[in-house]
Image (cartoon, grey):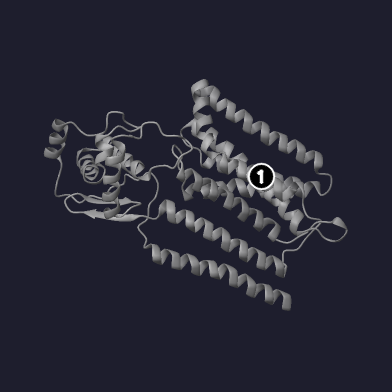
Amino acid sequence: MQFAVALLASAVIVLGSPFMGQLQSFLRRSLSTKNYVLFFGVGVMAAVGLLIVIAFLRIRERRAQRSALMLIALLFGGTYMWWTATPFAEVNAVERVHFVEYGLIAFLCYRASLSRRSLGEGGSYRGDPSILILPLLAAFTVGTCDEWLQWFIPYRVGEAHDVFINLASIVCGVLFALAIRPPAAFSARLHPASWRGIGMVSAMVWLIFAAFVSQAHLGHMIDVPDIGKFKSHYSAARLNELQLDRAARWKTAPPIAIRRLSREDQYLDEGLWHVRRRNGAEVDEAWRENLILERFFVPVLDLPTYASPNGNRWPPEQRADFGARANAAASFVSTAESYPLVAWPRTAYWIVVLVIAAILVLVPRALSRRSAGS
């Protein structure tokens, strides 16, 4: 039952991510900025306060140690939220909600791990470090799947950086859960079966995360003579193919109204990266970004999109003015991408990934045999 509850809550958070942006937009339209921030702030404080009250009602033994764990979790979480705060109150309010979400997921994963792996004789709960490590890995995987789905759908951004941001709330959730429901006995030494379990789970978590990074963050560095360099998910040849495809399809079905539950067009997204960078840059950079658009993203310039119903092409006089003033001899590397892209060879990347996965499986197995022998 504990496992089913954790799985259901994880599914709700991951599958509900397409609608979170829609809910946030609705609340922003319905509330003033102050009330919007207050709404989320009060909700988060109420949730945390309720958990604290429940914890104190349940803690009857070892009060000092368990209260100290709760205090550490609260101080760590509060410090982390203060440290990562942005100048934008609306963004901070939403991040607080994510913090509570993943703290809850970690809490539920801990309970599932405790009930499935640590029930000893007489119904007492006994534990080793696996009851903390496995929930961390499970909740980290939920965060990876959440960001991966957000990368696929319009209006949301999914990147590896956000997966690691969730780790702070996951740690707080596990500490809080440990304070509320500690095992009856705890050994710092891993049981042989725990070694093997951690190895297999770590390898699976690593492969899932690596697959996400491969799709979201691996790309190509494209070097175009007389223009410069820029990063893309696609090779230059593939960009040319996509350009021809979108030019034909968008003439009759331009991407003006995009359904929230649909696959995001990464080609369009990349074109808009360069449009935004061009429109906010100085002369030299704006000129090179415009050349990239004219070379690889003509449909984004000439056809209507949800971001610009009239297209994004410069008027002839503006283009001529920027071309006359730009330094054509300067080297140029675009920084238009809205999240990190790395131009690593995919074959080498996956060789390293698989080697690390093998190490994660084989080393704990060897340690398990060594532990069993001793």
- The residue tagged 1 is 8
For the residue marked with disc 1, what is the amino acid? Leu
Query: Is residue 84 shown left or right of residue 298?
Result: right
Location of residue 167 in the rendering, given as x and y in whole percent from the top left corner: 57, 49
Query: Is residue 227 shown left or right of residue 68?
Result: left
Q: Is residue 25 above or below residue 81?
A: above
Q: In this view, does 185 lie above or below 240?
A: below
* Residue 262 visible from this viewpoint: yes
Q: Which residue is drawn at 28% across and 47% down?
A: 334
Q: Which residue is drawn at 31% across and 28% down?
A: 309
Numbered circles on residues, count: 1
Q: Is mark 1 on a helix, strand or loop?
A: helix
Location of residue 132 in the rendering, given as x and y in whole percent from the top left corner: 68, 56
Question: Farthest residue in the bottom direction?
Answer: 373
Q: Residue at x 46, y 48 (%)?
A: 159
Location of residue 135 in the rendering, given as x and y in whole percent from the top left corner: 66, 53
Between 166 and 144, the one nearer to me in the picture: 144
Location of residue 231 in the rendering, given as x and y in whole percent from the top left corner: 31, 51
Query: Is residue 222 shown left or right of residue 37?
Result: left
Label 1: how many Cα within 10 Å (few below 14, some 14–19, many 20+): few
Q: Which residue is drawn at 57% across and 26% down?
A: 38
Q: Which corner quadrant of the image does residue 256 belong to? A: top left
Quadrant position of the C terminus in the picture: bottom right
* Residue 78 visible from this viewpoint: no
Q: Which corner quadrant of the image does residue 99 belong to? A: top right
